[in-house]
Each structure stands twice: as structure tokens, then as C-alpha cells.
Amino acid sequence: MSNKISFGLIFSFIFITITLAQYPDLDTVQISGTIANDTTWTSNKIIIITGDVTISSTATLTVQAGTIVKFLYTSSSFQKKRLTVDGRLNVQGTAANPVYFTS
């Protein structure tokens, strides 16, 4: 295993561990791939984007107020995670209860 891959795996483990420590009452869900059906991300789970995500042209992704969406960070520009919207993205955050997209 190369040093880059080893570092990436270690960093990913640390990232998920820190995330869980910050929000001990919330479960996490790891997401990647295509969202082909209408889907709702709720605020009772931390969404961790582990690979590219595409919302298909026939689907709607609804993100409820208070939801935390974390993109798994890697130091390589070739491994950045993307959210591509070919369908609809409905983000329901408010000033009092925002949705967080972060890394």
C-alpha cells in the first residue's frame, strides 16, 4: 500500500472519529453514487459524502433543516468529492436552523 493511500485511510478514520465525537447523539450515513429516486436527508443523521454523488434527472434530493452534510476530505485534488445536480435539490434550511455543507 502506498504512503498516499495509507495517509488517506488514516485521515478518513480520524475524520469520521472526530465527527462522531462532535455529535455523539447522531448516527452517520455514508453516501456515494447516484440518487435515482426521491430521497430525503434528515437532521437526525450526519451525511458523509465518501465519493461523487449525482442526483439523477428524475430525482429530488430534499435536505431538511438542521442537517449536516460533510464531504470526506482528501489532500489530493484528484479525489475531491462532488455533488452533481441533474435533477432537483431542495435545501430546507432557515436562518434559525441552517443546513451545513462542510468538509
Image (spheres, rainbow, N blue to C red):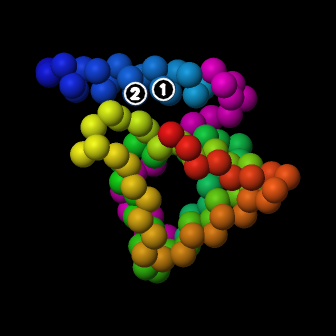
Question: Start and end of the magenta stretch?
Answer: 21-37
Instruction: Please state if 90 lies on the left or on the right of 6 as rendered.
Output: right
Badge 2 density bin: few <14, some 14–19, many ≥20, Cα 10 Å: some
The residue under the point 35% across, 19% down is 10
As displayed, is residue 8 above or below residue 79?
above
Residue 81 visible within the image: yes
Task: Tell me where residue 5 sits by quadrant.
Answer: top left
Looking at the picture, tell me which residue is in the foreground, 80 or 45. 80
Could you tell me which secondary element the residue under label 1 belongs to? helix
Q: Which amino acid does label 2 sit on?
A: Ser
Residue 19 image offset from top left, x and y in percent = 58, 28
- Does the segment drawn in magenta span residue 25? yes
Q: Give how far across and how far down residue 30 sits, in percent.
A: 47, 42
Q: Distance between the residues labelled 2 and 1?
A: 5 Å
Q: Which of 67 and 59 is in front in this view?
A: 67
User: What amino acid is labelled 1 in the image?
Assistant: Phe
Q: Where is residue 26 in the image (x, y as percent from the top left)?
A: 68, 34
Residue named by callout 1? 15
- Give the residue at mark 2: 12
User: What element does badge 2 sit on?
Assistant: helix
Residue located farthest toward the bottom when viewing the structure as drawn: 58
Please report contact status of discs 2 and 1: CB closer than 8 Å, yes or no. Answer: yes
| Residue 10 magenta-highlighted | no
- Where 45 falls versus 58 (above or below)? above
Q: In which quarter of the image is residue 57?
A: bottom left
In the drawing, what numbered circle is on residue 50? none
Give the position of the N terminus as an image quadrant. Answer: top left
Residue 48's x, y, as percent? 50, 42
Q: In this view, does 22 lie above or below 55?
A: above
Check disc 1: other Cα within 10 Å, few if <14, some if 14-19, many if 20+. some
Q: Which residue is drawn at 57% across and 37% down?
A: 28
